[in-house]
Amino acid sequence: MTGTVSALNLGKKYKRYSGPWRRLGEWLTAGRHRAHEEHWALRHLTFEVAGGETVGIVGQNGAGKSTLLKLIVGTTQPSEGSFQVEGRATALLELGMGFHPDFSGRQNTLMTLRMGGFSEEEGLEILPEVTDFSELGDFMEQPLRTYSSGMQVRLGFAIATARRPDLLIVDEALSVGDAYFQHKCIRRIRDFKELGTTMLFVSHDPIAVKTLCDRALLLDQGQLIQEGSAEAVLDYYNAMIAEREKHAKVVKQEEQDARTRTESGSGEVRIVRVSMADSRGVETTSFTTGERALVSCELEFRDELADYSVGVLLRDRLGNEVFGINTTYLGLDSIPGMPGDRVLARFEVELHLGYGHYAISVAAHSPDGHVDANYHWLDNALTFQVLPGDSARFAGVAALPASGSFRRVPR
């Protein structure tokens, strides 16, 4: 199947010079005088992407994500290892890169298509599709220097996706432009995915990664440290960020109820029990749409702690965040704890949710947020089910109050 990517022990290093004269000195001595330091942007990467998969690549800035994509599209060469790409690839790395400011949108489109391997006849055939998707109209005949940055993004995306590739590589290309066009781009990407296009998707937007990607790769300091389902990898990434900020510890990841549970935290307080109950106080994990649920989190203190927050986060079956609340948002004062003390935090939530299965993540952290201080974070601590009730049928993940009516319009 085309659209596959495989990498074996892939690595890329760069030379760092403290100044231009040191670079010149090394060049004049034919390398006998070494004046640089080696920086490995990527090292020991081994992975495979099957045809038709959508794989997210996540990690902090400087993790090596963009370097990996540049290797795959051929704009830079590896320093070690090997990789193989099968099929025609299109990369959305820097939309509009290579455009000439004095050429019109039409001229830039035809020029870019020719550089992409299309003949002049094919370019003229594709041009109306680019004009239609970008919605630039008469601006297609205007020089690019008169375009706003958003208009350039529209043109760049329309050209890059005018023909469905075997492999589509997206690097934060959808983080710019207006909301309307972002939705339009997402729809085109979804269409490509349904038609079997393989995708590599780099984004700092966890909802986009969870929604679009089948699985994810987590890069850190140039190395692949985690791979698996998008939800599990992003949970681990979230814990890793908290660890860096306040020396928390990623405790473990384990499979439970077909979901990966990630547990992290510095340990001043631990969540020892999570439960759900109906409005009568009877423990259950089945509710009907609109029913009130009681979520209880029992904490055990390992150290003295006076000020903290407890929160719960509801996610749907795809891992998308549906609703989150914590005691700080609710204006509740925390109960100070000493080692050995136990405190019960309880939330009442009306489940105006669509039918299906959901998961609850719970956390105890600083009032300023888990990145500031993560004491204990437990992803997928509990799963529950929402069933149809007596209310009107609906579609979607949220059961919003709604009504409707008919009336006859006079002729």
Image (cartoon, rainbow, N blue to C red):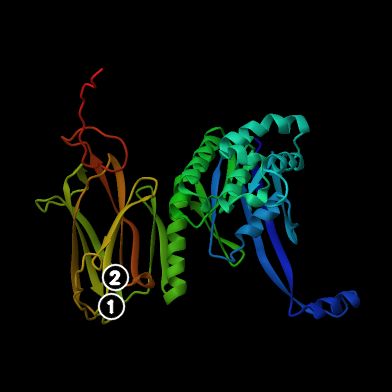
Q: Quadrant of the N terminus?
A: top right
How far apart in space, not on screen, are marks 2 and 1 (Cα)? 7 Å
In the rendered image, the residue lying farthest to the right is: 29
Q: Is residue 295 left or right of residue 372?
A: left
Q: Which residue is mark 2?
A: 270
- Crowding around mark 1 (Cα neighbors within 10 Å: few <14, some 14 to 19, many 20+) is some
SS of the residue at dot 1? loop
Tell whether 79 sits left or right of 45: right
Residue at point 62%, 62% (across, down): 64
Determine whether the residue tagged by mark 2 lies in a helix, strand or loop: strand
Q: Are marks 2 and 1 in contact (CB under 8 Å)?
A: yes
Q: Is residue 368 left or right of residue 405?
A: right
Can you say which quadrant of the picture contains the C terminus?
top left
User: Which disc number belongs to residue 302?
Assistant: 1
x%, y% of residue 346? 18, 62
Residue 311 image offset from top left, x and y in percent:
28, 63
Kind of residue sitting beneath label 2: Arg
Q: Residue 338 is drawn in which quadrant?
A: bottom left
Residue shown at the point (47%, 56%) measured from the top left: 233
Q: Residue 176, position in %: x, y?
A: 53, 53
Instruction: Looking at the picture, tell me which residue is in the foreground, 143 or 407.
Output: 143
